Amino acid sequence: MKEFSQKYLKFLKDDLGGLNLTRILDDDEFYQKQILDSVIPIQKTKLIREELEKKKLLIDVGFGGGFPIIPLSYLFPEFKFVGFEGRGKKVKAVQKIADYFKLKNISLFHKRIEEVLIDFEAIITFKAVGNINKLLSCIHSTKTVYVCFYKGPNFLEKEGNEPLLKGWRLVDENEFEIPGTEGRVLLVYKNISVPRGTSSKNKINLVKLSDLL
């Protein structure tokens, strides 16, 4: 992954330099804080690896400069990766990165997750900063999904300890040491019932994931 990281950063600097897709421009720091931080939590969480083997599909929400979706799709070519991003310029830029690495297992969309009805069993990742309950409330699904949140070690101090949104259950929590960082916590939630917002009335305005793929 080190060579992949160097090529990634070079492409960001040389071909996409004006888009500010990352503020990290040092090779080692980029490798640690963008590449390793993207892959280690998923790679080393036993539950998620087992579920990914079954479901074959990972959905990344708000991928920004391509993290974690690009490193994950490169590391796991046997799985399908779908990304949703609300900023069109970043979708186009990350598509260029996917094309550069010849990644055939990735599909990127200029959409917000709350606009999509997930009608496949899947793993969902959120690496961007955001309140857990608020982000879970954006997910509309008719299938079982596991939602992974990449958080810093002090996330409870920053987000508080509010009751979890009804219909969801925390099923796994793991801490990881990432070189050059304060560490990473991966929180995994599973829907224990169809999340709110997926009633027949609300489904009418949603785009089915199966219609996008």
Image: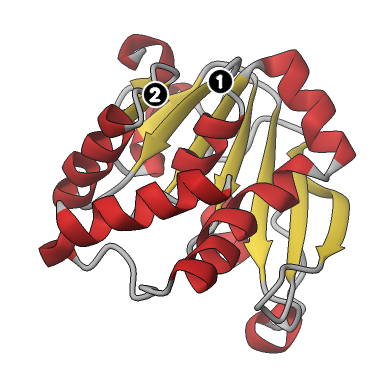
Task: Residue 68: give x, y in percent of width and height.
Answer: 51, 48
**In the displayed image of the protein, which residue is found farthest to the bottom?**
157
Identity, as a three-letter code, of the amino acid under mark 1: Pro
Quarter holding the C terminus is top left
Residue 137 seen in this snapshot: no
Can you tell which mark lies on residue 60? Answer: none
Res. 77 mark: 1
Q: Secondary structure at mark 1?
A: loop
Residue at x-position 59% and y-position 18%: 79
- Mark 2 vs mark 1, CA separation in Å: 8 Å
The residue carrying pointer 2 sits among few (fewer than 14), some (14 to 19) or many (20 or more) residues within 10 Å by Cα, namely: some
Front residue of 129/71: it is: 71
Q: Secondary structure at mark 2?
A: loop
| Residue 101 position in % (x across, y down) | 35, 31
Dot 2 and dot 1 residues touching (CB under 8 Å): yes
Q: Quadrant of residue 156?
A: bottom right
Residue where numbered disc 2 is placed = 103
Q: Where's residue 209, x and y in %?
A: 41, 19
Classify residue 64 as left or right of residue 55: left
Please provide percent x and percent y for residue 190. Answer: 76, 39
Residue situated in front as seen by the camera: 211 or 195: 211
Q: Is residue 82 above or below residue 131?
A: above
Residue at point 76%, 65% (across, down): 185
Mark 1 is surrounded, within 10 Å at the Cα level, by few (under 14), some (14 to 19) or many (20 or more) other residues, namely: few
Say what amino acid the circle numbered 2 marks.
Answer: Leu
Depicted 78 relative to depicted 60: above or below:
above
Q: Residue at x 42, y 11 (%)?
A: 210
Which residue lies at the image location 70% right of the left edge and 78% below the top edge?
155
* Nearer to me, 67 or 13: 13
Q: Is residue 139 visible?
A: yes
